[in-house]
Image (spheres, rainbow, N blue to C red):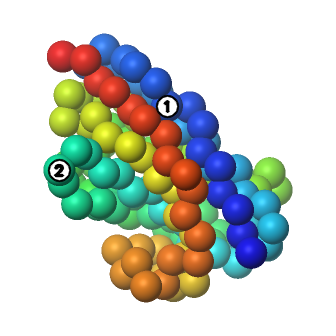
Amino acid sequence: QMQLVESGGGLVQAGGSLRLSCAASGRTFSNYAMGWFRQAPEKEREVVAAISRSGRSTYYADSVKGRFTISRDNAKNTMYLQMNNLEFEDTAVYYCAASHGLARDMRRVTQIAAWGQGTQVTVSS
């Protein structure tokens, strides 16, 4: 079974930056499309970004395009989310996920093989 551990969350002022990491173990990392989700209080969990197995294809929610960058290092079994120009509305718990499906279909949660425990990102206005 794959295990995922997020790190890098914290408190930042609006306009600031954070870099989240997701370390994977237990399965062959490159066999999975990967994604970042977030869930704000009283809101549903949503896909923020996704990346293909090779890392060549990436997908973003409209709300983060141009501000967030997803990447992965298959040699290090790690995925990243660079978040720049953070906004108050980005405040949420961020989860990484590994999917049996395609990166472009990351919202199909039935294909999720593993979830991380989540890391809190708080943006002060």
Instruction: Identify the residue at the far front of this view.
Output: 42
The foreground one among 16 and 11 is: 11
Q: Residue at x 65, y 69 (%)?
A: 54
Dot 2 alpha-carbon crowd within 10 angstroms: few under 14, some 14 to 19, many 20 or more: few
Vertical side of 110 occupied by 40: above or below? above
Residue 71 appears in the picture as rendered:
no
| Residue 39, x across and y down, in percent | 30, 51
| Residue 49, x across and y down, in percent | 40, 57
| Residue 79, x across and y down, in percent | 62, 52
* Residue marked by disc 2: 42
Q: Quadrant of the C terminus?
A: top left
Dot 1 alpha-carbon crowd within 10 angstroms: few under 14, some 14 to 19, many 20 or more: some
Residue 10 appears in the picture as rendered:
yes
The foreground one among 67 and 26 is: 26
In the picture, the disc for residue 61 is none
| Residue 97, x across and y down, in percent | 53, 64
Q: Is residue 34 left or right of residue 78?
A: left
Between the residue at mark 1 and the residue at mark 2, the CA separation in whole angstroms equals 20 Å
Q: Is residue 124 left or right of residue 103?
A: left
Question: Nearer the N terminus, badge 1 or badge 2?
Answer: 1
Q: Residue at x 28, y 34 (%)?
A: 91
Vertical side of 53 occupied by 4: above or below? above
Q: Secondary structure at mark 1?
A: loop
Q: Residue at x 40, y 20 (%)?
A: 11
* Residue marked by disc 1: 9
